[in-house]
Image: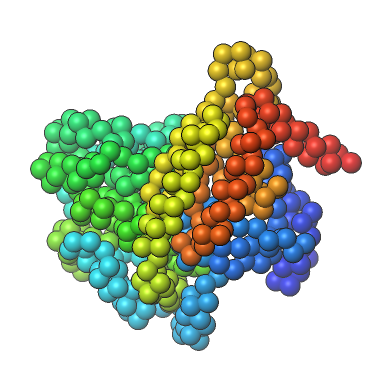
Amino acid sequence: MNLLTIDEAINLTGKKVKEYHKNYLNAGLANMLGLLDLDKIFVRAEGVCVWDAEGKEYLDFLGGFGALNIGHNHPAVLAAIEKVRRMPNLIQSSLGVLAAALAHNLAKITPGGLQRSFFCNSGCEAVEGALKLARAATGRKEIIYCHNSFHGKSFGALSVTGREKYQKPFEPLLPGCAAVPFGDAEALAYELKKERAAAFIVEPIQGEGGINVPPPGYLAQARRLCSQHGTLLIIDEIQTGFGRTGAMFACEEEGAVPDILCLAKSLGGGIMPVGAYITTDEIWKKAYGSMEKALLHTSTFGGNNWAAAAALAALQVIHEENLAAAAKEKGGYFLQALRGLKERFPLLKDVRGRGLLIGIEFNQPGGLAARLLGGLTDKLAAEYTGSLVAQELLNKHGIITAYTLNNPNVIRLEPPLTVTYEQIDRVLRALEDIFTRHKGFFSMAASGAGVVIRTLTQRKQ
């Protein structure tokens, strides 16, 4: 049996990495990234920067979809993990020392009377636990969620994720899940008046939906309506939390205190997988407040010492470096400059976001242009303009970005909160260069098709 050692794995060539992905992992994804020359192999990372095997430096403005608020490989997180490496990581028949400390700290930094945490390994697990908690605590079965939302792809989380593309192949999903338009308090009120919903789950800003910011006051209205009708408010801050939007948690902007708060991504400092939900003492006790109910929902690796150590260190960095305030200030600068580009370039349809969670949306071809574009070029231009911009940013300017899952015509700009103004300016110059060279869809589509053709040709040689 020929098994690769860790040293052999680290030294795999880029060609072998791509071959193994196509043979043993997701071949479709590997091929899609390869067509647009987005399948780079990176070997080193620090802060906002990553490097490929040839030593070329790139700026990471994707930021692990919000998992890298403190940047790559923060030394404080690595040092914390080193301190616990001789401790037992998993002993289920004992009380975790670091999990206790982490739960204490989360109770201190989260809004309102949130007190009791459940630890898991990812955002969708946090959502799964929150949905189960809501049902158990209220005795109700139905869940309300938003169109265009994204809460994960596990079965329960997918049932409240608002895009049919991801739901359809797995139907029937959980029964009793009703979708309402995001930002529409009247539609929410209509569903809540039925008084059958255990919970309303919502993102303060829709991330994968295209960085959609709701109308002012929406979260506060949702809080009031949920309280009025006996429905628990679950706020999913998996992507928006820990300073990303300019506050420690985005819901604090409106003083909307959830009954259950879902957390993950940057909680692990960009190094360890850590997820959690936190709720009130009252709600926890209704669901799990006895020895008989204590084991109804558990997680093998949830709250392990290495993960908890990383989370403790990450929270300390976010607090001590005041990264929420940094995100607010730098995000304001970034948004203002991007809106200036929008005024100059018709390819840009919209710029939106808050703090350092920013989306730029592209106009689509219409009329004669839409009829003339055909085949693969048509698909790339009409549905994936964002990916075309992303490949130019990567390959011509050394900047990593990606489009949002529910709206491929929006690319996200979500760098670590430690990003500098100089690095932001580099991205602005790159975008200006792209929009100057590609004034319309023919140019952008031709560029994308050219990359595809070159990639296919090279791979056949």
> Could one spot residue 366 in this view of the protein?
yes
At 66% from the left and 15% from the top, the residue drawn is: 372
- x and y percentages locating residue 243 in the rendered image: 37, 60
Which of the 4 image quarters holds residue 287? bottom left
- Figure coloring: rainbow
- x and y percentages locating residue 87 in the rendered image: 46, 85
In the image, 441: left or right of 299?
right
Task: Count how many numbered circles sit on residues in the image.
Answer: 0
Please determine whether, in this image, residue 293 is positioned above or below residue 409: below
Q: Nearer the viewer, residue 35 or 342?
A: 342
Q: Quadrant where the C terminus lies?
A: top right
In the image, 252: left or right of 336?
left
In the image, 453: left or right of 369?
right
At 59% from the left and 43% from the top, the residue drawn is: 431
- x and y percentages locating residue 150 in the rendered image: 41, 43
Q: Nearer the viewer, residue 101 or 374?
A: 374
In the image, 84: left or right of 293?
right
Q: Nearer the viewer, residue 356 or 341?
A: 341
> Could one spot residue 405 in this view of the protein?
no
At 47% from the left and 50% from the top, the residue drawn is: 334
At 28% from the left and 56% from the top, the residue drawn is: 261
In this view, which residue lies farthest toward the left? 228
- x and y percentages locating residue 398 in the rendered image: 67, 53
In this view, which residue lies farthest toward the right? 461
Q: Quadrant where the N terminus lies?
A: bottom right
Please determine whether, in this image, residue 71 is positioned above or below residue 128: below
